[in-house]
Image (cartoon, grey):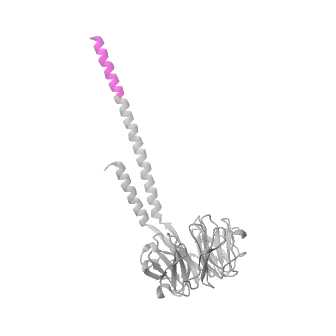
């Protein structure tokens, strides 16, 4: 096996080990005023349930929607205080970056767009408040039309905003400028919708609190199918997708989180304990071993480059010495001929 092939093989092995050790954490708001995490990469319901950790338990009163910004900070809607609390990646509260109660009213769902703007659905006031990445309120981008107790909120790949209206069981669509779009808004096959989520194909999913089910709609808003029923969709509130396209639903009355495969088939659920779950969000977190493997890979590449450089220098020196020896031999031969 050549040296180059050995290096490539080693790097592939390191990559596989790195992916195998990558935790995939789901963040959950609970009705005991905390945000908890579960590692869904563990596979089984028992292992996932056992991985429960408290991420944040301050500055929250009846926490609802949650979302990550582009820097990995977690924002959480605090319903009773009408604020949005900001936490860094370690779960430490960041008062300076949190959103105050002005322009908010009992917030439910929240979402970030591709440019880092934050949208907050206000359960009281029938509005959606928009903030720039610095946390400044943007009146021009905020919404106050065609809303009726807005709850869940989601943004598609084109920047269109979708808002679930709990009181009249509809979903309102707005373009990136906040203009209401009749085409694409939904008014059928919904029953008090709350959480919304898009899959990688642009299909929209809505959690029906009263229907105890999840409705799936195509990118054009056409109804496709119903997912879940009974125990595996016991008053679903929040929805989220993992990196493999599996759907997770927070069952408020069931005090559990259900997992469905990409086709919508129920796989299993795990208990969140006594607190009831509300909304969900995902963040992929590399294990420490992942960083170590990355450093090893970088070291292998750097070390190999140095070895190749040294080998090249030695070959060059050997070629130089050989040339000098040949030249010396030629000179000696010529001298012998002249003396003869």
Q: Which span of residues is magenta-colored?
A: 323-340
Residue 276 in the image: above or below residue 110: below
| Left or right of 35 on screen, residue 9 | left
User: Viewer-proximal residue, 136 or 178?
Assistant: 178
233 is higher (above) or lower (below) than 72: below
Residue 206, horizontal then vertical, whole percent = 54, 79
Our reading of the magenta stretch's main secondary structure is helix
In terms of depth relative to the viewer, which is nearer, 207 or 187? 187
For the question of whether residue 25 can be seen, the reply is yes
Q: Which of 141 and 242 is in front in this view?
A: 141
Where is residue 146? Give x, y as percent: 67, 78
Residue at the far front: name it. Answer: 183
Q: Where is residue 259 in the image (x, y as percent from the top left)?
A: 46, 79
Q: Where is residue 288 in the image (x, y as percent from the top left)?
A: 47, 64
Q: Which of 136 and 208 is in front in this view?
A: 208
Q: Looking at the rendering, which quadrant does residue 183 occupy?
A: bottom right
Residue for point 38% across, 37% down: 314
């Amino acid at each position: 096996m050549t040296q180059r092939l050995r290096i490539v093989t080693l790097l592939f092995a390191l990559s596989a080990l790195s992916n195998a050790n990558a935790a995939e954490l789901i963040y959950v708001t609970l009705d005991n005023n905390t945000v908890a995490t579960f590692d869904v990469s563990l596979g089984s319901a028992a292992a996932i349930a056992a991985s429960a950790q408290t991420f944040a338990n301050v500055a929250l009163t009846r926490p609802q929607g949650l979302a990550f910004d582009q820097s990995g900070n977690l924002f959480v809607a605090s319903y009773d205080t009408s604020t949005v609390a900001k936490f860094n990646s370690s779960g430490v509260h960041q008062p300076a970056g949190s959103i105050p109660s002005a322009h908010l009213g009992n917030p439910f769902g929240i979402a970030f767009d591709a440019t880092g703007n934050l949208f907050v659905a206000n359960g009281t006031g029938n509005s959606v408040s928009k903030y720039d990445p610095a946390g400044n309120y943007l009146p021009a981008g905020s919404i106050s039309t065609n809303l009726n107790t807005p709850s869940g909120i989601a943004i598609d790949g084109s920047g269109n905003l979708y808002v679930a209206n709990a009181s009249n069981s509809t979903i309102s669509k707005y373009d990136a400028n906040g203009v209401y779009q009749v085409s694409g808004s939904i008014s059928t096959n919904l029953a008090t919708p709350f959480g919304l989520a898009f899959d990688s194909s642009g299909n929209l999913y809505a959690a029906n609190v009263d229907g105890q089910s999840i409705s799936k709609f195509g990118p054009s808003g056409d109804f496709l199918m119903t997912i879940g029923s009974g125990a595996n969709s016991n008053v679903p509130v929040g929805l989220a997708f993992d990196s493999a396209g599996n759907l997770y639903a927070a069952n408020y009355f069931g005090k559990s989180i259900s997992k469905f495969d990409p086709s919508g088939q129920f796989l299993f659920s795990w208990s969140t304990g006594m607190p009831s779950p509300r909304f969900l969000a995902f963040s992929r977190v590399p294990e420490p071993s992942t960083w170590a493997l990355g450093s090893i890979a970088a070291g292998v590449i750097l070390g190999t480059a140095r070895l190749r450089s040294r080998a090249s220098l030695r070959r060059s020196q050997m070629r130089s010495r050989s040339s000098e020896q040949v030249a010396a031999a030629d000179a000696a031969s010529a001298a012998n001929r002249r003396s003869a």
